[in-house]
Amino acid sequence: MGSSAKKKNEKRKDFKKPKLKVGKARPKSDNFTDTSFKAKAIVLAHQSLTTNAPTQSTQFCHHLSLLSSRSSSQRRDSLASLTTAITSRPVNTPLPQPVSVLLPKLNPLILDGSNSVRSQLLKCLATLPSREIVPHIGHTLLYIRAGLTHLAADIRSSAIDLLLWAIETCPNELVSCTGGWVKTLKCLLTVLHWHAASLTPGKGATARTNAWSSSWAPTLGKDGCEGKLPVKTLNVLAAFLRAGLKEEHDADADATCSEKWSFPLRYVEVHMLPKRSNAFAYLNLFEPLRNEESEMYVEREERQRIFQKRFDAIVFSGVEAAKREEGEVGRAAARVAKALAEGMEGFESHR
């Protein structure tokens, strides 16, 4: 009897609720596992670094190599690091790498599929010295024209912003480089659906005075970059026409004007050294023959002549049709008309 009562009491313990007392810890269960641990660290009183930290030039080259990364976020962060390194350098200090090395790495990103990469690219290009960009603007313009005719509306919009940056940075060199005048005008008018490519030299631009295209109308009311693209393109076209058709004002030439020099110093500006890096490039002495589109139009009269021959009629008809639109499109078209009137002022065959 005693053994059976003892077994019954042991079974009841499993279902008996323990009484808790104030100030005493709760008793641990039989299957309790201790999971506490202690962390230990080794502290050295004296440490010596056997490797040197990378220099700023090494970091700059490292981020420059990452511009071809497959990750868009990596390309964007590398561009941001390059922009910070350029802007934070001391005054009158050369760049870690020359512009001739930077631009071949930066130019392909004009056609990048990521919007954040293209936005950061514009910020990075804006930090570069304008004087060092001038000799290489022709190579950059090739990628900008490819972006203007891209199928994606976002890339076309970014290319418009980059073209505006190029016009503000080096306007004279932009319109006078190889293909910088005719080909860029054709791309801009193609974006505007004015179809300048259909004009053939020899038949005259008056043969086809293209009106406001029907494909243009659906884009005017759209939201986003596709709806803002016509206004941006018209504003950039006005700036491009001012850069190419307006008479250049050279302060140095005014300072060396013959009226300010006494005899025998006459026409001093004619005998001074040229400011261009390749002053005789327009002669095309050592390059293949160029056609009318790829030619360099250094002088203002040459650009006025080719504009009158190939683009005047189509731009005039397109601007007149765009001015009838309301809102920002009409105001932007009015700015194009003003730039065209000022640029072709004094040209004998202008309408």
Image (spheres, rainbow, N blue to C red):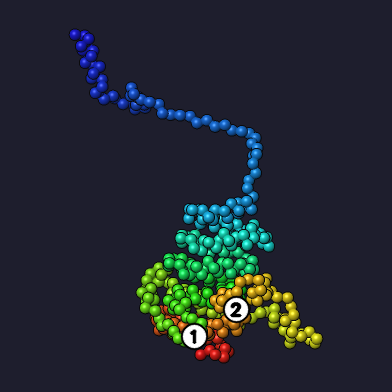
The answer to whether residue 327 shows anywhere in this view is yes
Residue at point 55%, 82% (across, down): 306
Mark 1 against mark 2, which lies toward the viewer? 1
Callout count? 2
Q: Is residue 71 above or below residue 326?
A: above
Q: Which mark is residue 297?
A: 2
x and y percentages locating residue 86 in the rendered image: 61, 59
Residue at point 49%, 63% (across, down): 111
For the residue labelled by badge 2, is the local secondary structure a helix, a strand or a loop? loop
Q: Which mark is residue 204?
A: 1
For the residue labelled by badge 1, is the local secondary structure a helix, a strand or a loop? loop
Question: Which residue type carries mark 2?
Answer: Tyr
Tags 1 and 2 touching, CB below 8 Å: no
**Neighbourhood count class around disc 2 (C-alpha, 10 Å): few under 14, some 14–19, many 20 upward:** many
x and y percentages locating residue 297 in the rendered image: 60, 78
**Neighbourhood count class around disc 1 (C-alpha, 10 Å): few under 14, some 14–19, many 20 upward:** some
x and y percentages locating residue 91 in the rendered image: 67, 62
Marks 1 and 2 sit apart, C-alpha to C-alpha, by 19 Å
| Of 192 and 281, the residue lying toward us | 281
Instruction: Answer with left or right where residue 69 lies relative to residue 92.
Output: left
The answer to whether residue 161 shows anywhere in this view is no
Q: Is residue 287 above or below residue 37?
A: below
- N-terminal of the pair, mark 1 or mark 2, is 1
x and y percentages locating residue 29 in the rendered image: 33, 24
Q: Is residue 154 above or below residue 335?
A: above
